[in-house]
Amino acid sequence: MQNKNKTVIKSMDLLNLFLTHPKLNTNDMVQLSGMPKTSVHRMIGSLSDMGFLHKNQDGYYTLGLLFLQFGNLVAERLDIRHVALASMEKLRDDVGFAVHLVLRDGEESIYIEKLDTHHPVRLFTKIGKKAPLYAGASSRTILAFMPDTDAAAYLEEAELAPVGSGTIVSKEELRTLLADTRRTGYSFSRSELEDYTAELSAPIFDHSGQIIAALSIAGLEVQFGGEHIPDLIQKVRSAAAEISLKLGYGGARG
């Protein structure tokens, strides 16, 4: 910690409050952060001057437009989004479900692209949404194909807490499902991140054979009838394999 700038860290703590709150006033930030009001007021001033925060006429702060500029740059520079987009569009049009592209972000997964159906229904997913690596088909796909040492360390330390009514909270059951995913090349979840929804996911590998992302389709649980699952599995796996080939992946994994 001695090598880190504490003011920068505290400023990030303030900005992180806006991940779950669309707007906050000064008192809100003081209460939620636990920082002294004078410190919060000083940091708000600096963040506003730099364009990271914007003050509305009602005295509430929102994230500044500078984040939109940075966000667009990050999105443009995530090459996998460009590589995957055509395959995602083809899959969406073929199966009629929302399609997601998901990356690992530390001990979580993050949804970096989403294509809605032409008749979208409300889902738990949106670009920037995060989920624990143990919950949901995309997260579990990433966890299943992570390097063994990384996956083992994660499973050792993770505390499995329910997110939806179907979240897996037993490590023994989770390990069984991860082995199934490695064997079959896909993962399927029901009501793990949001009740009454389902997600079907397959891995995307890079040129070195390492998992780089997960591709998934998602919709209402009732839309995933048993008779349709084999066909959907084949289509999601094929689309993920197509993207992997575009990224230079050339071999089968055991």
Image (tube, rainbow, N blue to C red):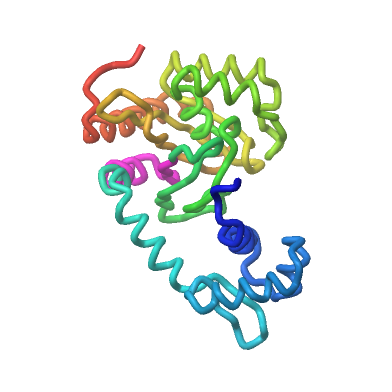
Q: Give the residue at x 48% y 20%.
A: 181
134 to 116, vertically: above or below: above
Q: Position of residue 141 (x, y in %)?
A: 47, 28
Q: Give the residue at x 48% y 32%.
A: 200
Residue range highlighted in magenta: 85-102
Between 148 and 201, which is closer to the camera in this rendering? 148
Q: Position of residue 212 (x, y in %)?
A: 37, 33
Residue 97 colored in magenta in the image: yes
58 to 69, vertically: above or below: below
Q: Residue furthest top?
A: 254
Q: Give the residue at x 58% y 59%.
A: 12
Q: Residue furthest front?
A: 2
- Judge from the rendering whether residue 34 lies leftward or rightward of residue 97; answer left or right: right
Q: Position of residue 243 (x, y in %)?
A: 28, 35
The image quarter in which residue 7 lies: bottom right
The image quarter in which residue 96 lies: top left
Q: Position of residue 8 (x, y in %)?
A: 56, 60
Q: Which SS type dominates the magenta stretch?
A: helix
Q: Is residue 19 visible?
A: no
The image quarter in which residue 130 lies: top right
Between 53 and 186, which is closer to the camera in this rendering? 53
Q: Give the residue at x 40% y 51%.
A: 115
- Judge from the rendering whether residue 155 lies leftward or rightward of residue 226; answer left or right: right
Between 11 and 194, which is closer to the camera in this rendering? 11
Q: Is residue 197 visible?
A: yes
140 to 55, vertically: above or below: above
- Judge from the rendering whether residue 119 lies leftward or rightward of residue 171; answer left or right: left
